Image (cartoon, rainbow, N blue to C red):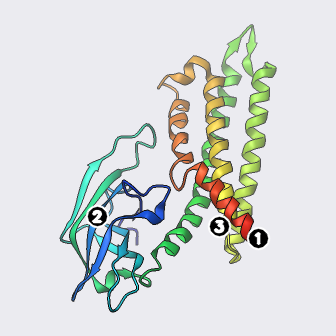
Amino acid sequence: EGKLLGAFALTEPTAGSDAAGIKTTAKRTDNGFLLNGSKIWITNGGVADVYVVYANLLPSDNDRGGVTAFIVEKSFPGFKLGAIEHHMGIRGSSTAELFFEDCEVPEENLLGNPGMGFAYAMKTLDGGRLGLGAGCVGMAQRCMHMSQDFAKQRVQFGQPIIKQQAIQFKLADMATQIEAARLMVYQAAWMDDNGMRITKHSAMVKLFCSQMCNQVAYDAVQVHGGMGYMTDYPVERFYRDARITEIYEGTSEIQKVVIAMQLQRERR
C-alpha cells in the first residue's frame, strides 16, 4: 500500500565493490538470529522503516553458513542509525550508516534460504542497474532539452547560439547518445520481461547509460557557459547528480568486470 519505505543494506566500510567481503555476522539463537556489524552509504537509510540486510551467517548444526539476507525493522532491539551523509549531488536522497549490536531478528525474518544471500543481492542489482539506466536516459533527455531551449534564446555574435555549428554538433551528439542508450534500456527490459537472464545486458546498460549521462550533463553545462555554473539554472544540479551514476549500483569498472566474466562464460 506504499505505507512503508525500504532500504537495501549491502555495502560496508571494507566491502564496497567486493560485495562478497562483508563482515557483518549473523548467529543463530533459540529465537532467531543476532546480527553484529555495520553498513555504510545506505540509500533511504535515514528514512526507511524496513531494511534488507546481508550478513555472514555463522555455520551451525542447522546451517551451512554464508551470506544470508534478513528483513530488519527499525524497531528491532540492537539496531541503531548512524550518521546521515551529505552529498555532492542527489541531495534529496537520504544516505546513512547502520549499526547492529546484537540486533535481534526473529526466525520468520530470514529472507529466502540461508547462504543464498549473495545470489539474491546480485539478482537484485541486475534489476537495479536496468532501472538506473532508464533514469540516466531521462536525466540526459532533460539536459538536452534545457540546452536546446537555452541555445535558442542566448544570442552571441548577432544570432542565437543554436545557429552556431559548435553548439549544433553538441546537441547532435547528445541526441545520438541518448537514443542509443534508450534502445539499450528497452532491449534489456524486454529480455527481463520475457524471463531471460540480463546480468550481462544490465551491466552494459549501467556502464553505457551512466557514462552517456555524465557526458551529456557536462556538455549541457558547456552549452550554457557561465550560466551553467550558476545555481540559478538547474543544469548545474544535473551535472552534480549525474556523477553518482558511475559509482553506485556498482562502479563503471565493476560493470566491465561483470561484462567480461559473462563473455568468458558464453565461450566455454
Q: Position of residue 112 (x, y in %)?
A: 44, 83
Q: Which residue is mark 3?
A: 199
Q: Residue at x 40, y 68 (%)?
A: 2
- What's the distance in space between the residues labelled 1 and 3, CA to CA? 12 Å
| Frontmost residue, 161 versus 239 | 239
Name the residue furthest bottom: 61
- What's the distance in space between the residues labelled 3 and 2, CA to CA? 29 Å
Quarter assignment of residue 109: bottom left
Q: Which residue is mark 2?
A: 37
The numbered disc on residue 52 is: none
Query: In the image, which is nearer the foreground, mark 3 or mark 2?
Result: 2
Q: Position of residue 246 (x, y in %)?
A: 57, 46
Q: Which residue is mark 1?
A: 266
**Location of residue 162 with respect to 193 vertically, above or below:** above
Q: Residue at x 61, y 48 (%)?
A: 136
SS label for mark 3: helix
